[in-house]
Image: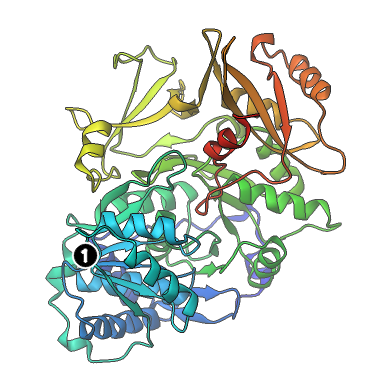
Amino acid sequence: MASQSTRDRTLSERTVPERTLLSAGSLWQLLELRVASDPDATFLIEAATDNRMSFGQFHRRALALASWLQDQGIHPGSVVAWQLPTSIAAVTLGFALARLGAIQAPVIHLYREKELVEILAQARAEVLILPPGSGEYLAMAGSAVAALPAAVPRPRALPLEEPGGDSLRLPPLTVSADGDAVRWYYFTSGTTARPKGARHTDRTLMAGSHFLGASLAVNDRDLGSIGYPIGHIGGILYCAMAIMAGMPVVLLHRYVPTEVVAAFRRHGVTLGGGSTAHYQMLLAEQASSGDTLIPSLQVLAGGGAAKPAALFAQVRSRLGATIVHAYGMTEAPISSHNPRHGSDDQLTHSDGRPMPGLEVRIVDGAGRPVAAGESGEILLRGPNVCKGYLDQRQTADAFDAEGFYHTGDIGLLRPDGHLCVTGRLKDIIIRKGENISAREVEELLLTHPKVRDAAVIGLPDEERGELVCAVVEPLDPADPLTFDEMAEHLAAHKLMRQKIPERLEILVRLPRNEGLQKVVKTKLQALYAGK
């Protein structure tokens, strides 16, 4: 194990030139390049067990597992869904299936029967691979398969076993070298509607991985971490980035702050990953600690949810780390990313520079490009954008005739070329004809000392069309924010009077999805619309 002292370096001490990130045509070729140069370097560390695996060991195990999978009837083109917690076994499975040339449909391990039925139906999976010895997952799989529509194939549930077999019988390497073949189905979280299956290739995923690594300036002196479900698209992106950089990664089975802090301290993690909710959890832990929580921690890198501007200064002053945030989505991961050594203004107020080769177009409601610096819907076309959805109707709705993907996000391009995401088209509240950005109000609410998190929603109202409702997660449930305190705080920050919420609700914990812990506003609207 690398000692903490070898990892405990400030950003200014990184004087050794950054190593060039490896590039390859496919994920399997990328792994083989890394094994050829650094077979004995550590790749994966399981926080719960401290088990670790080098790149060479991982490569051999993936080959053995690919052979076992082939013996189970999985071949190039087979559609395989898998639902495993974040672990060495899950990462190995992903690369073993990549070696076989199978099509993968990863399922977040926290999903239950409802989500599993939807994913199996859309993917038309032939096999569903589950954790070994888990009666709970097998029972859930049985119920999900039984609930599938009659016209959908019934996948076979297959508990994962210890790999074995003769890897020499595997298909030729040309099968796994086609980086442009659609081999990945990743599903959106379904926070506003039924999940959508985005069709990805090795190359679309690796484009995001390479840009992520370049933006974070990672190398083999860093130690990264994955604290979110490995079935999320960020899982394969982060692992591919680690292979490109030769960087070890700590895998967290679950994100329990006390356990995360202990693991980060034990292994000397320099790069913490996740989203805004994960940053807030670490800040809460630091508040109860007299010492620096994680001395080795230099960067908190993440995306998938909006980052309030106030968090940057809080993390810098309290944790001694820098938030380096990104903008992306399942359909187009890591579309923009802040540089690790960017200015405080960029890191605080922007969502980063767009990926090289990615075309970003900002348009108004009629689809016309807006003037420089003006807000509009963000459209994307480029190397990281998925090849459409499994449902062709969804593809037709989301992609225009020029091949641009309509994100549904609102943003603008700054004079320095950085992208600022300011909200969602569906997150605009129309009160008496006035457009109100929910994110603008949320940002101000989060600066109040009594607020841990906040969500602003529109609720039906006969007089106004929609009224503005703030739902606040209090820092201290025994001393929640009052309506008068909220109104005075927002007025003091010069928020237009018409934008101040007419209603305040207090919720001990906001509902979040199982991926990157984004707040699920549809649940809040269902909860409060009838009151």
Task: Say if 387 sits above or below 251 in the image.
Answer: above
Residue 97 falls left or right of residue 266: left
Q: Residue at x 71, y 35 (%)?
A: 472
Residue sitting nearer the eye, 254 or 479: 479
Task: Say if 437 sits above or below 97 in the image.
Answer: above
Task: Say if 496 sits above or below 509 in the image.
Answer: above
Residue sitting nearer the eye, 356 or 303: 303
Element at label 1: loop
Residue 94 percent coordinates (x, y): 34, 69
Q: Quadrant of residue 252?
A: bottom right
Residue 118 percent coordinates (x, y): 35, 54
Q: Residue at x 26, y 43 (%)?
A: 383
Residue 252 falls left or right of residue 378: right
Instruction: Pick the quarter of the image with the C terminus.
Output: top right
Query: Which residue is denoted by mark 1 in the rendering?
Result: 153
Residue sitting nearer the eye, 246 or 518: 518
Which residue type does callout 1 highlight? Pro
Task: Say if 260 sits above or below 423 in the image.
Answer: below
Residue 491 percent coordinates (x, y): 75, 14
